[in-house]
């Protein structure tokens, strides 16, 4: 591996309560579901764990509650080798949870109760100056308060760190936040919320990605599920096709994608190469049930990239 990639992920930590069902229930309806599982999740934690599995030295900063879910999560992060010196245990709020229904097609519907994640405030970033001086990339999502995201992006920018914003869950953003981002990466729904227009095909995704550059992002990478991804820089807009796989559960495909892109960028690969690798990571993630269990290791991803004849890969 070249110079070991170093990343800081600031974001949400949740316990995911997952049930399988034939379909999502209608309003007022009770359905008999299949198997129930409890799996660690939260976009921030998922992306941090994904980065660590891909061989990056990864700091994770966020808030968990002083409860059983929080303790289980913390132990999991330690097992994954995350640096969690600045992960805060909040004495006054429960650990965030997500209730997830996975339907027969492998698509998921989610309700999140943010708990401690909502109290991850700009003051939590004060101890991070030294960490920011060491990392190549800062990775954020929108499951913590926007003021914290803005403050973190500003700190990253000031220190010349590459700032990556995974734009989930869906919401509109003020232009001054978009302007602090080096790579903004929404999926279709998130892009619609950012842009206020529909993303119906690759052509509208390309136009949307261009629009994100006009809004101030240095680059935009749109995640398009089974269509793959669109990359836009001031020089080029291109579509990268998805890898064909059998989808079992799409939970965390976007997290695997963003993490792989961030690790590849932290290693000095070009954005185009990073997205080719990320498309492979997203494809691998949809072949496994659950959020963190489906995040690929560096070896697995390198092997998959090679099997699929990708030009870009993380070194094994
Ligand atoms: P999110 O999980 O944020 O909704 P997507 O569903 O777009 O994001 O998935 C992220 C990436 O994972 C996609 O850009 C694509 O590269 C890959 N991916 C997702 N679903 C599939 C699929 N059914 N087949 C192959 N690749 C997929």
Image (spheres, helix red, strand yellow):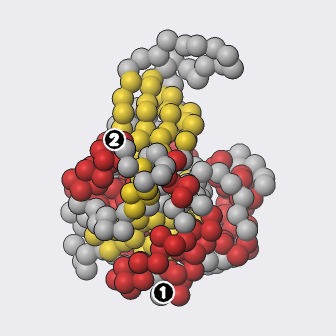
Q: Which residue is the extreme one toward the right?
A: 196
Closest to the observer, 142 or 309: 142
Helix, strand or loop under label 1: loop
Circle 1 crowding by C-alpha within 10 Å: few under 14, some 14–19, many from 20: few
Q: Observer-nearest residue: 245 or 188?
A: 188
Question: Image quarter for residue 208?
Answer: bottom right
Provide the residue designation for mark 1: 160
Q: In this rendering, does residue 237 appear at all?
A: no
Q: Which mark is residue 123?
A: none
Q: Indicate the quadrant containing the N terminus: top left, top right, bottom left or bottom right.
A: bottom left
**Looking at the figure, which quarter contains the C terminus?**
bottom left
Task: For marks 2 and 1, give the one nearer the viewer.
Answer: 2
| Residue 111 coordinates in the image, percent (x, y) | 57, 37
Image coordinates for residue 162, horizontal then vertical, percent: 48, 78
Q: Which residue is mark 2?
A: 68
Residue at 43 percent across and 33 percent down: it is 17
Q: Is residue 297 left or right of residue 278?
A: left
User: In the image, residue 81 lies at what x, y percent?
Assistant: 23, 60
Q: Residue at x 72, y 58 (%)?
A: 172
């Amino acid at each position: 591996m070249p110079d070991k990639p170093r990343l800081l992920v600031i974001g949400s930590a949740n316990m995911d309560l997952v049930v399988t069902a034939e379909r999502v229930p209608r309003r007022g309806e009770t359905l008999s579901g299949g198997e129930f599982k409890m799996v660690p999740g939260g976009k921030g934690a998922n992306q941090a764990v994904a980065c660590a599995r891909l061989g990056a030295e990864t700091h994770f900063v966020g808030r968990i509650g002083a409860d059983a879910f929080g303790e289980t999560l913390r132990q999991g992060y330690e097992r994954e080798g995350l640096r969690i010196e600045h992960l805060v245990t909040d004495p006054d709020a429960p650990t965030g949870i997500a209730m997830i229904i996975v339907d027969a097609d492998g698509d998921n519907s989610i309700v999140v109760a943010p708990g401690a994640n909502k109290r991850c405030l700009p003051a939590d970033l004060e101890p991070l100056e030294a960490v920011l001086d060491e990392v190549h990339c800062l990775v954020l999502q929108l499951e913590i308060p926007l003021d914290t995201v803005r403050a973190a992006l500003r700190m990253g920018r000031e220190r010349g760190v590459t700032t990556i914003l995974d734009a989930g869950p869906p919401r509109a953003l003020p232009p001054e936040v978009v302007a602090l981002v080096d790579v903004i990466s929404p999926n279709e729904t998130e892009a619609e919320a950012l842009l206020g227009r529909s993303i119906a095909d690759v052509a509208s995704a390309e136009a949307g990605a261009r629009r994100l550059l006009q809004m101030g992002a240095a680059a935009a990478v749109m995640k398009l599920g089974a269509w793959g991804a669109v990359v836009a820089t001031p020089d080029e807009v291109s579509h990268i096709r998805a890898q064909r796989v059998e989808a079992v559960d799409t939970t965390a495909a976007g997290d695997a994608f963003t993490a792989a892109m961030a690790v590849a960028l932290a290693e000095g690969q070009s954005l185009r190469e990073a997205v080719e690798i990320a498309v492979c990571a997203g494809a691998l993630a949809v072949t496994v049930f659950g959020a963190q269990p489906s995040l690929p290791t560096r070896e697995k991803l390198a092997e998959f990239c090679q099997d699929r004849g990708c030009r870009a890969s993380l070194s094994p």
